[in-house]
Image: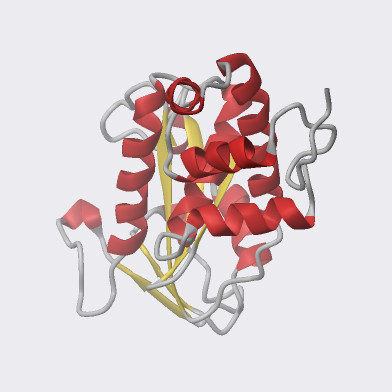
Amino acid sequence: MKLKNKYQKFSKISEQKFREIIRCFALDLTASDTAKMTGISVRSINPIFLKIRHRIAALCEQSSPLSGVVELDESYFGARRIRGKRGRGASGKTIVFGILKRNGVVYTEIVPDASKASLIKVIRGHISADSEINTDGWKAYDGLVDMGYEKHYRVHHGSNEFARGKQHINGIESFWSYAKGRLAKFHGISKEMFYLHLKETEFRFNHRHEDLGKILMKMLRNNPI
């Protein structure tokens, strides 16, 4: 029997029960915990969570170019990386490039490697030329000034330099810590699902000071899954 539900098309779940599911998702509960809380089977919860994650990812990809003071960094997800290895040495890792607007939002993108060509492609598409860019000393960031990003500041972690006044990348590094801590609770994520979980983490970080449940309900009212 199909029930009236403004959040889900052709739903067999009541609108009230569906709101409970959304609230559980907003609280970052797993599908198993949500099933226990709502009395709805995990088999029914999983496809709902998957559709919500697809919507969130699509919303994140619509983000406008970042401007102002931004921090750039790459991070490596998956099996433990060999200390000191970066770029080609990150075999078996999923490499994520992040751009954080200081005291604001973050944008993440999976990249094939940490080479200059890969990172510059993302930078050009997501950072305004008048931005103040902060990076570490990784060689892929060489030449940003020549490309029109005139305000480029670096801290050299290899020389134990982690901040020089307001020049640092502490914000994006804090995001990496949050992301890895959050994703660890899933005890392993397939490569096929990693993108969706990454974008969900980005979305949660960007709305960390807001009521995520209300945001999700509004999103699904406007465009039911």
Residue lying furthest left in this view?
Answer: 160
Q: Nearer the viewer, residue 16 or 45?
A: 16
Query: Is residue 15 visible to the viewer in this orientation of the structure?
Result: yes
Callout count: 0
Q: Is residue 20 left or right of residue 86?
A: right
| Between 136 and 103, the one nearer to me in the picture | 103
Q: Is residue 61 left or right of residue 39?
A: right
Asked whether residue 99 is in view, the answer is no
Give left or right: position of 157 versus 147: left
Residue at 71% x, 60% y is: 62
**Residue drawn 38% across the image and 73% down it:** 103
Measured as percent of width and height from the top left, residue 162 is found at 20, 62
What residue is rendered at 41% in x and 43% in y?
A: 75
Q: Residue at x 57, y 53 (%)?
A: 119
Work out which quarter of the rendered image holds the C terminus and state it.
top right
Which quarter of the rendered picture does the N terminus lie within? top right
Seen from the viewer's position, the closer of residues 141 and 173 is 173
Q: Nearer the viewer, residue 77 or 47?
A: 47
Residue 87 pos. (x, y %): 46, 37
Whether residue 112 is situated above or below residue 168 in the rendered picture = above
Q: Position of residue 190 (x, y in %)?
A: 55, 20
Question: Quadrant of the rendered structure where residue 185 is?
Answer: top left
154 to 217, vertically: above or below? below
Coordinates of residue 12 in the picture (x, y in percent): 76, 26
Residue 218 vs 76, above or below: the answer is below
Identify the image's colour scheme: rainbow, by chain, secondary structure or one colour.
secondary structure
| Residue 2: quadrant of the picture | top right
